[in-house]
Image: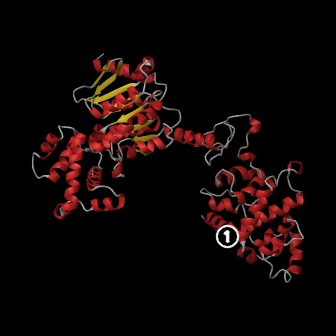
Amino acid sequence: MTQAEFYTEQLIETIKNFTNAPYLFIGSGLSRRYLNTPNWENLLKHFASIIKKDEFAYDSYKSLANNNKPKIGELISKDYDNLWFNENEFRETQPQEIKDLIRNLKCTPFRAAVSLYLKSFKELEPSHIEEIELFKELSKKSISAIITTNYDELLENLTSYTTYVGQTELLAASPTGFGEIYKIHGTLNDPNSIVLTMEDYQEFDKRAQYLSAKLITFFIENPIFFIGYSLSDININNIIDTIINCFPKSETKLLEQFAHKLFFVEFNEKTELEISKYEYSTNFAFTKIITNDFKKLYSLLSEHKQKIPINIIRKLKAEFCQFTETNVPTETIQVLNIDDERLEDTDYAIYIGSQNSIIGLVGVSRDDVFIDIILDNLKYTPDAILSKAFPSFLNNKTKTPCCKYIVCAKKIIPEDISIPNTFEDLIPATIKNKKHNYQELNKNKTINWIFEKDEDSVFKKLNYLHFLSKETILKDLDLLQLNLLNILEEYPNAFQPINKGGLSSSDKSYLRKAIRIYDYLKYGEKAQEIINKQKES
């Protein structure tokens, strides 16, 4: 067995023992490898040469700043901005898009120029395409999240993760720890967010302890792989130091457990694979991996797969956290038995509590639908209601309002869903026979007149709707909606049994018929177009 094979076996065994998917902490080395972007020093050299047409331009800044890169960045930033604002000739030599960035994003010329320059590196390095494809696959099921100090958009383009930019956004948000990118040094899309100068780094360091405390809640449970950094990088050393300082000195065992989960990956053209313990500081030694082939590392990490894709885990966690905080179900949280055959391949279910306490889609009643037409309080999607709730209404389907759901649906409407052909189809036969006799009498009557009548109950008033023309109701449809809304708010148990505060059967009937009229006149025309178009196709 060669040394590389021995270390490969060792790494395989280590990855097998992971209980959680790792985090990746990614530095500029990965962007250099895949996009050929400059490192920090070469970025500063590039702009130093623009400011001073002198082969020793960067050296002069280096000397003034005592080789302190954040300070060099600050000096170059000031000189570039001064030239931009004071030298029209210099301004005209720079890309004209910089002007747009300054105006639209209210950033300095130097930040706009850096953003524009780094965005020009778009093409992926052809020699690493296979490696890049492995990274994409790795992100789907084998890593929890990514932290990066890079500004570019490489990671967003290679994954489907949600991005948090800068310390403020991360600290203010509620990250799930799954399927997310934390760009702690900012992003090119927001030049003001990027950490570039001495002042930026000082501000970053001020808040680093809070950031580390936030990240450590993720780190304590997950392995961490640093990729694209050098151990001589002072910035990454500062980040590691800040994280270490978050642990109380008395918690040596906890710190040791953290160190065991930390892996530092370095690229070396001459080393196929080498693994060793690196003594970073007293009582803190982590694993150092040296390799010339990231494909092997990605392939090995891919062996540890989450059973559910990372983006689904993130969505479930975010939705469930929202539900527990607000006690309000979301559109994507639905309740079904786990073995229900209607549960689609793309659906996942969480079940808590006794079966008797569950109201799933099959438990949505016709009266729930009537109420939802006005209050919009069902948290299921229109497609789910049409395809999964309506089948349980049996012979009452045609008398259940559905135009709203047809108009708002995104999928194909089930074939057995239909709506009245005309407004007259909503009028009961007994009223149709009388309607002609009352037509002249009701010619000038309006919705307002109906609800202002004092001699009848509010529910009996609703029955007068059948004697009005379609055109009359359409003129005051918003007023009808408002009155129905007020009724349902005043009688929240309207459709419950009488002994539970519900209405009489005749009053329930008046209310249902009025809601059907509203649904048809509000959404019916559009719903009919959708159904006809679907039949034609």
Report x, y in % for residue 521: 71, 69
Q: Residue furthest bottom?
A: 440
Report x, y in % for residue 465: 81, 71
Taking depth in this image into account, of 317 and 423 the one nearest to the observer is 317
Residue at image x 75%, y 38%?
Answer: 357
Which residue in the structure is indicated by mark 1?
Answer: 525
Report x, y in % for residue 205: 34, 37
Q: Residue flagged by tag 1: what amino acid is it?
A: Glu
Q: Is residue 227 left or right of residue 516?
A: left
* Residue 160 shows in this picture: no
How dense is the environment of label 1, judged by Cα within 10 Å: few (below 14), some, or many (20 and up)? some
Residue at image x 10%, y 45%?
Answer: 56
Residue at image x 35%, y 32%?
Answer: 239
Taking depth in this image into account, of 496 and 192 the one nearest to the observer is 192
**Relative to residue 247, is residue 29 depicted above or below?**
below
Q: Is residue 497 left or right of residue 326?
A: right
